[in-house]
Amino acid sequence: MKMKHFAAVLGAVIYLGGPAVVHAQASMSMDAATPMVSLTDGEIKRIDTDAGKLTIKHGQIKNLDMPGMTMVFVAKDGAKLASLKAGDKIRFVATNEGGKFFASEIQSAQ
């Protein structure tokens, strides 16, 4: 009897809990397939304009569940790199597309 009750409750949690869990997560939008992104604070350490890449020491990237560290990002808008220099404090959107990390919506935080 207890096993049937457990199975029924578990089934209800899985059925009803799925959407509720998605809405409870701050990193997800109303559409579970579209993660919400937020701006991340960072400091530019190096820019490689020829490759369209920049090295950023960043804080926690919430939408990627990633702690702060220094890493290389590909700039979504390579033309934006011309207006940046090492040492600039920035805010940016970080995304992971197929294992490649991108920085977009780069803006000055100074």
Image: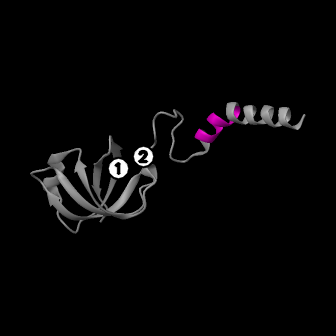
Element type at mark 2: loop
Quadrant (top left/top right/bottom left/bottom right) for the C terminus: bottom left
Element type at mark 1: strand
- Residue at image x 84%, y 36%? 3
Residue 59's spot in the image, x, y percent? 39, 63
Q: Is residue 13 above or below residue 37?
A: above
Residue, far left: 50
Kindly check if marks 2 and 1 are in contact, taking CB atoms under 8 A apart as contact: yes
The image quadrant that residue 16 belongs to is top right
* Amino acid at dot 2: Val
- Residue at image x 42%, y 46%? 37
Q: Which residues are magenta?
A: 16-22
Going by the image, does 94 lie left or right of 18? left
Tell me the crowding category of disc 1: few under 14, some 14 to 19, or many 20 or more residues within 10 angstroms, Cα based: some
Tell me the crowding category of disc 2: few under 14, some 14 to 19, or many 20 or more residues within 10 angstroms, Cα based: some
Asked if the magenta segment contains residue 18, the reply would be yes
* Amino acid at dot 1: Val
Residue under label 1: 93
Name which of mark 2 and mark 1 comes first in the sequence.
Answer: 2
Residue under label 2: 37
Q: Is residue 50 above or below residue 13?
A: below
Q: CA distance from mark 2 to mark 1?
A: 7 Å
Q: Which mark is residue 105?
A: none
Residue 44's spot in the image, x, y percent? 24, 63
Residue 89's spot in the image, x, y percent? 28, 65
Which secondary structure type mostly characterizes the magenta part of the structure? Answer: helix
